Amino acid sequence: MATRIFAQQLVGRSGEKAMSGRGENRLPLPVVSPYNESYLIMVIKHAADIPSSEITDKKLYLNRREFVRTAAGTVVAAATGVLGSEVLLRAAEPAAHGRKLANVKKSPLSTTEKANTWDEITTYNNFYEFGTDKDSPSILSRNFKTEPWTVAVEGECNKKAVYHLEDILKGQVLEERIYRHRCVEAWSMVIPWVGFPLSDFIKKCEPTSKAKFVEFTTLFDKTQMPGTRLPPALGGLHWPYVEGLRMDEAMNPLAILAVGLYGEVLPNQDGAPFRLVVPWKYGFKSIKSIVKISFVEKQPLNTWQDQAATEYGFYSNVNPEVNHPRWSQATERRIGEFFKRKTLMFNGYGAQVASLYAGMDLKKNF
Ligand code: MTE
C-alpha cells in the first residue's frame, strides 16, 4: 500500500505531468512542495480499495493518516536513503525547553488572540532541510548545532563582514511579538516570537542607495540537514533556501528577526538560532536559520518561486482573493481549532502594510 501511494504521488507529480494553472499557465507540479500532505490525503480519499465505512470514525481516520504518512515516508527514505531510520522510529516530540531570554519587552504590535501552545508550535513545522513531513523537523533537528553561529553581511552596504550572532544581539532590545502566522497550505497559528525589528539590523549595516532588496540565505549543511541530501532530480529543492524582501518591506516595523519563542531561545525546528518573521506574508517568506544577509539591486529569486513560478511568487502576501492554482486561500484552519476561519487580507495587518502595495496589481504580483 505504501509503495502504491508513493508511486501515485510520483506519477501524479511528474510522470503523468500533473498540471496546474494560473490563468493559461500550466506547469508540471514539483515532486516536493509544501502541499505533499494534502496531495497524499487526496490520493487516499480516492483509493478504490478503502471502503467508506472505514473512514467514518475520525480517530481511525487520523490513525490511518498518520500511518500512511509514515509509510509513505518509509518508501521515500528507503528510495533515497536520505532521512535514515530515525524519523521512522521516533515520534514527534515537543522541543525541550531552552534558555530564558532576559529583558523581553511586550509590544503594542502583538495580537491579543490566543497563542498556540509550545507543543503545537514545535511539532507542526515546515523546515524542509529536516524533512517534508510536519513532524520531521522536531525529530531530525534535535542535534542541529546552532552555537557558535555567524551571519555574513554582503552586497550593497558599508558594513560587510561576518558577524557572530552574540555581537548582533549585543545591546539589542528584545521584544515579544505575538503574530498570526498563515501558511500558504491554508493552516495558521498564533506564535509568540521574541525578536527585534529587521529595520534595526538593516540600519546598522548601512545599505547604499543601490540596495533595493534584501536577500536571506539559510545554512546548507548536508551533514546536519538530512532533507538537503535529496537531489533536485528526485524532487529535492535547490539548496540553500533563499528568500527576499523589497527594501521598504524589510524596513516595515512588523518585519522582525526572531531569536526566541515563548520567552526562550528559538527551538531548532522553528529556525534556530536566527530567523525572519514577516507576518503579512505566507509563511514560506519567513526563512529559518539565516547565515547570510545580502543587499542587492535585483529582485532575488526565492526558493519556492524557483521551484514553481506559477504557484509561488516573490511577494506572497496573504490574500484571500488570489487562490493558489490547486486550492482556495479564502479560509484557513487554525491549528487546534475545528472550524475553518476566514483568511484576512494581509493576514489582518493591512493597516500597517497595505500602503506598501498601493497601485500594484496583487493578482499579477502574487
Ligand atoms: N525556511 C527554511 N530554511 N526552510 C523551510 O523549509 N519553510 C517555510 C518557512 N521557512 C522553510 C523555511 C514555511 S513553508 C513555513 S510555513 C514556515 O517556515 C514554518 O515555520 P514554523 O515551522 O516555525 O511554523
Image (spheres, rainbow, N blue to C red):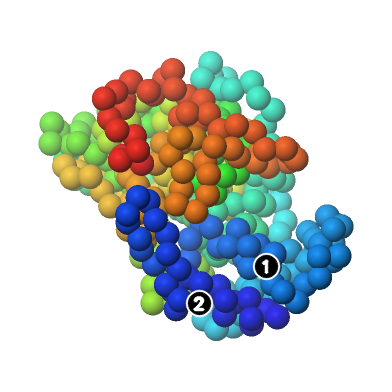
In the foreground, 247 or 360 = 360
Where is residue 241? Give x, y as percent. Answer: 38, 57
Q: Quadrant of residue 354?
A: top left
Q: Quadrant of residue 75?
A: bottom right
Q: Quadrant of the C terminus?
A: top left
Q: Residue at left 29%, top 23%?
A: 358
Where is residue 226? Give x, y as percent. Answer: 51, 70
Marks 2/1: CA distance? 15 Å
Q: Residue at left 16%, top 42%?
A: 297
Q: Residue at left 68%, top 42%?
A: 335
Where is residue 184? Give x, y as percent. Answer: 50, 46
State whether residue 222 is above or below residue 183. below
Chain-order first, disc 2 or disc 1: 2
Question: To which residue does mark 2 refer?
Answer: 11
As drawn, is 52 to the left or to the right of 256? right
- Identify residue type, mark 1: His
Where is residue 348? Give x, y as percent. Answer: 51, 25
As drawn, is 66 to the left or to the right of 195? right
Q: Quadrant of residue 193?
A: top right
Q: Quadrant of the N terminus?
A: bottom right
- Identify residue type, mark 2: Val
State whether residue 311 is above or below residue 354. below
Front of the two marks 2 and 1: 1
Q: Badge 1: how crowded within 10 Å, few (<14), some, or many (20+)?
A: few
In the foreground, 139 or 309 = 309
Q: Badge 2: how crowded within 10 Å, few (<14), some, or many (20+)?
A: some
In the foreground, 43 or 143 = 43
Q: Taking the image as drawn, is residue 159 in sight?
A: no
**Ligand 1 has an atom within 8 Å of the beta carbon of the residue at disc 2:** no
Question: To which residue does mark 1 refer?
Answer: 46
